[in-house]
Amino acid sequence: MTSQATSQATSPALTTPVDAAPQISLATCVAPLVEALIRDADALRLKVSRGPRDALIVDAGITAAGGLEAGRRIAEICLGGLGRVALVPAGRFSPWDTLASVSTSDPVLACLGSQYAGWSLAAGDFFALGSGPGRAIAAVETLYGELGYRDRGEKVVLVLETSVVPPAEVVDEIAARCAVAPSDITLILTPTSSLAGTVQIVARVLEVALHKAHALHFPLEHIADGVGSAPICPPSPDFLTAMGRTNDAVLYGGDVHLFVHGPAEAAKDLATRLPSLASRDYGRPFGEIFAGYDCDFYKVDPLLFSPARVTVTAIDHGESFTAGGFDPILIARSFGG
């Protein structure tokens, strides 16, 4: 029996960012979700403790067991409180019949402004990419200039895909960039090989589509709405296997529907160029592709990182365009290996 889980959407709160236009505050929207995650830590099999510089550490799979529901909630935190993630049954890739289904009231801000793992955090041997609403407070990425957005908040929340607790130097950097005390930082840690990590990565299927649309120079202001889904893959204790499966879930099993303004031809062009099928590296499990490039992400064709199938609806014209397709054989090869 496949379980289904949803959460209540939070009411958007407003702040005045640097461009002086009232906008949604990701920090305010996400606060109730973070509070609930910490409150329910025991039930979710999480461990909450104070770490370096007294930062709050939420262990979702390093020494804690974590689980699917923890991953679902963390995925909604990554979306800055502006999205819903549900675990839903589907017969698309039997026997891997559970999908992470993602929807959001503000896809550009939720996916690119919050969920996208765009903040590089490094110190010594430690490296992780930060995602979540805290990115918009630091706004160290050039992306925020393009979005015309910066958040204000006294509490900073970041999700890190890592199997170790970040050192004090990383906490210091976050505190300095966000102008908060280290004790006001919450770091949610989700190893790739964990159940929670698997769910929160697969739940990035819509974000992957938004990121590629941005890379293709489609006007982000024309993207009105979107939904996406991808199969929950089995985790693996081996990092490379786990990383390969989570990528394959999106590249060969992800499904996204975008609703856009503008000319129908522009929508058709986006649908044609968006799916992973458009990449020269398409057609092999991601683990094999990655190994073939000496485990160097920068050698992988960036056009590969997109959902398998994409539908784009030109809402001003009532026309829809679909391109790409699923590869159940490759999904079975990846998930069952």
Image (cartoon, helix red, strand yellow):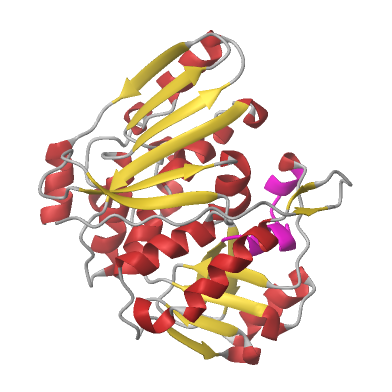
Tell me: 87 left or right of 174.
Answer: left
**Residue at horizontal 68 percent and vertical 62 percent from the top:** 27
Most foreground residue, 76 or 167: 76
Relative image position of residue 169 (x, y in whole percent): 64, 83
Compared to residue 136, the image places residue 264 above or below, namely: above
Asked if residue 284 lies in the magenta stretch, the reply is no
**Residue at horizontal 70 percent and vertical 73 percent from the top:** 155
Most foreground residue, 309 or 280: 309
- Magenta residues span 132-145
The answer to which image quadrant residue 217 occupies is: top right
Tell me: 275 left or right of 130.
Answer: left
Q: Quadrant of the image for the C terminus?
A: bottom left
Most foreground residue, 87 or 232: 87
Compared to residue 58, the image places residue 235 above or below, namely: above
> Is residue 193 among the parts visible in the rendering?
no
Tell me: 61 left or right of 107.
Answer: left
The answer to which image quadrant residue 28 occupies is: bottom right
